Image (cartoon, grey):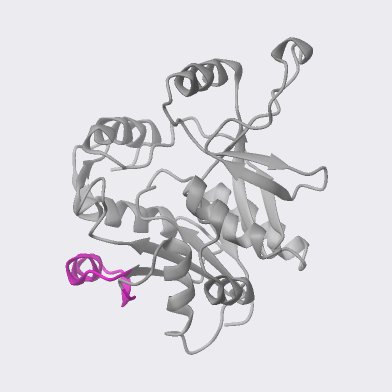
Amino acid sequence: MSGDILIVIPARYASQRYPGKPLAELKGASGEAKTLIERSWEAAKRVGSASRVVVASDSDEILDAARSFGAEAIYTSSDCRNGTERCAELLSSLDEEPEIVVNLQGDAPLIPDWFVEDLIAAMRADPSIDVATPVVRCGRTLYEKLVADEKREIVGGTFAAVSSAGDAHYFSKRIIPHFDLGKIGDGPLPVLLHIGLYAYRPAALRRYVAGEPTLLEQLEGLEQLRFLDLGARIRVVEVKSPEWEIWELNNPSDIPHIEASLQVMGID
């Protein structure tokens, strides 16, 4: 599989905030209802560079549902603490190793195909990159909302601080970097909103699971911080924002927002 791109959709049934959410139904533009896991699989299948798409789960119910609509589905252990660990475990089930593994999380069916393609292009352009992940630049209206939310102790996203070379310095659920808005003028804001999508070298995944969760990873609740603690290079790729809002399904109240975006996308 040298040169191949494997997209993994990690999905677990026992979500603390929303148990069983991969099987939650979402209506498309025509009113047809499909489960979240099927819509995530369809998003992965729209990526032209993908050689293979696999649903990885510890739930027989999710695996059976995935197979019912034609997806390849492979069991991974309930011991996996996050999607990255699930992607790493899946490698041991493969006969041959892919060039790049993409983690398209099973609660994000609105990810545009070009987000994934841009990560793949970045990885192929620089073989020294261990991981690649996308960000979108935060506009002023959204920034003001996020600042107001933060003052009320509401977490509104994950943010990336990036070097001049384009590599990650840090990720946080607090807005970073700190800056004086008055000194920015009319220029673009230095606030990069992280999208939970990853491309990895297989060697980086093996190194990740060889280490234990780190202090910063546990404090922030961000799995990618383990890579930084291990000295991995994470290339942060700024991508073009789509015309629709990218919502993840974390709570039942998110369903109308996702369905509205499916309408904008014209996806049945």
Give the residue drawn at x 56%, y 34%.
241
192 horizontally vs 51: left or right = right
Give the residue drawn at x 49%, y 17%.
145
Q: Is-magenta flag for residue 156?
A: no
Question: Which quadrant is home to the C terminus?
Answer: top left
173 horizontally vs 14: left or right = right
Number of on-image labels: 0
Task: Judge whether residue 224 can be spotted in this image.
Answer: no
Residue 139, quarter of picture: top right
73 horizontally vs 189: left or right = left
Q: Which residues are magenta?
A: 57-77
Image position, residue 137 (x, y; %): 63, 31
Image position, residue 55 (x, y; %): 35, 67
Nearest the viewer among 110 and 171 is 171
Nearest the viewer among 1 and 233 is 233
Give the residue drawn at x 58%, y 75%.
4
Answer above or below: position of 242 versus 204: above
34 horizontally vs 247: left or right = left
Question: Which quadrant is home to the N terminus?
Answer: bottom right
Answer above or below: position of 96 versus 89: below
Give the residue drawn at x 52%, y 34%.
242
Task: Judge whether residue 263 can be spotted in this image.
Answer: yes
Image position, residue 61 (x, y; %): 17, 67
Residue lying furthest front in this view? 215
Residue lying furthest bottom in this view? 95
Image position, residue 128 (x, y; %): 77, 67
Q: Is-magenta flag for residue 64?
A: yes
Residue 233, quarter of picture: bottom right
